Image (cartoon, rainbow, N blue to C red):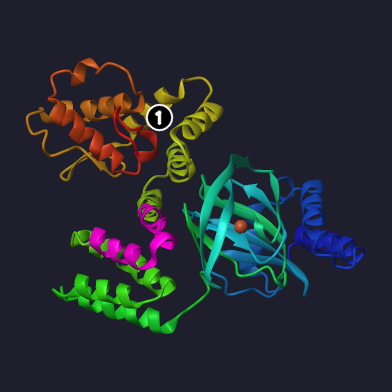
Amino acid sequence: MDAYFKELGETVLARWKSENFSLAKFPKIARAALDEQPPSAHVDLAALMRDFLLGDDQPPQTDSDFGEPELVAYHHPRFYIQLLFWMDGTTAIHQHEFSGAFHVMHGSSIHAHYEFDKAQPITPYLRVGDLRMKKMELLEAGRTVPIVSGPQTIHSLFHLDSPSVTVVVRTQNDPGTGPQFNYLPPHVAFDPTFSDKLTMRRKQLLDVLEQVGDAGYAELVAEMITELDFERGFSILYHCMHYLQELEQWVPALRVFEKKHGKLAAGVGATLQEDARRSVIKGLRSTIIEPEHRFFLALLMNAPTRDDLLALVAQRFPDQPPVDTVTRWASELTEVSDEGITILDAVFPETLVKVESNRRPELFVAAFRHFLRPGKALPTIMRDLAAVNVKAMRTVFEESALRPLIPPSSGRTR
Ligand SMILES: [Fe+2]
């Protein structure tokens, strides 16, 4: 067992025991102990990894799949200390059934805090409401953040460096504060540990129909949604979304759900659409390793508005106007391949066949910059484009991961 974590664990144990293991006191105790002897300054990560690999004197480990991986560095029946490695992972937006504090030991992360208003339970495992971001901040090595169980700490982390390592000092479990909801912004909360086995098997059976290209798939899904309750209908709709979109049957299926569940279903379409956008950004993470670009992805995933996003860019890169920084990233992220010209998942429109191929990357970045700044005149490079082509370029960005940055054009609302 690592000597530093043994000492940290014993310090926390002595202080918490003297408070009669009060759950309310634990986050403060954990935070103070981490801040007094911060792991970021006292732990030699390479030596710790070597000891863990070679020494058998380790605390009991878990089979948790949170972290990439999770190592338990200290264990007591009431609490434990874990190290979470993160390679290209980002956490879901979640709350906890435990309390304590976490500390950034290595690397840095974007940390977003949320609150869930107007929560309406549908079943014990699913709720609808309004998820609102309260704060987004950059956490660098050395920072410690308390964790309070239940809906008081709803947060997500997007790790910028690979690996990022956090140390968590946490209770085993805080009774009565479950379930440990995950949140799908902007309107849905669900218990990720709940398993409805019949629904799981139905989804697998739908996958069979998808794989054989069954012509009745969309109709069958619509029939199921008509028959099912909210929770199970939502689960089926969520599962089938991608394939229904491919079949161009997504909107009719969503309408069936909305018709059946009325007001309760009002936020479901926006939530699933947002989830699909976030999945694209998560997928891009594994191929984008430059920390500045990962920072950009973190903002695209989490910043609630264009202004919030640009304000955070300005805060981290104060030497350049944020629109210039974002344009530079777009330019660096432009890729030319056989599939076309892309900035992240935005693809240069095929309809612009008349533009010479060597001009296209520059035009694409110029168009992105133009749409970022509403009210400005068209840049020279775009002046000979027909209005329909300008619109096609705008649509490409509006339908991509870059959407939060593109304000609606005049006369339109979104
Ligand atoms: Fe957490």
Residue 253 seen from this side: yes
Q: The magenta stretch spans which residues?
A: 250-273
Name the residue furthest left: 354
- Residue 94 vs residue 1, the one in the foreground: 94
Q: Which secondary structure lies at badge 1?
A: helix
Tell me if 350 is positioned left or right of 121 in this view.
left
Tally of numbered tags: 1
Q: Amino acid at mark 1?
A: Val
The residue located at (35%, 68%) in the rendering is: 260
How far across and how far down the image is residue 46, in percent? 62, 54
Residue 109 seen from this side: no
Name the residue furthest right: 18
How far across and how far down the image is residue 88, in percent? 46, 53
Tell me if 320 is positioned left or right of 248 in this view.
right
Image quarter of residue 363: top left
- Residue 142 vs residue 190, the one in the foreground: 190
Residue under pointer 1:
326
Residue 181 to residue 282: above or below = below
Residue 125 to residue 108: above or below = below
- Magenta stretch containing residue 266, yes or no? yes
Tell me if 203 is positioned left or right of 12 in this view.
left
User: How would you classify the magenta stretch by its main secondary structure?
Assistant: helix
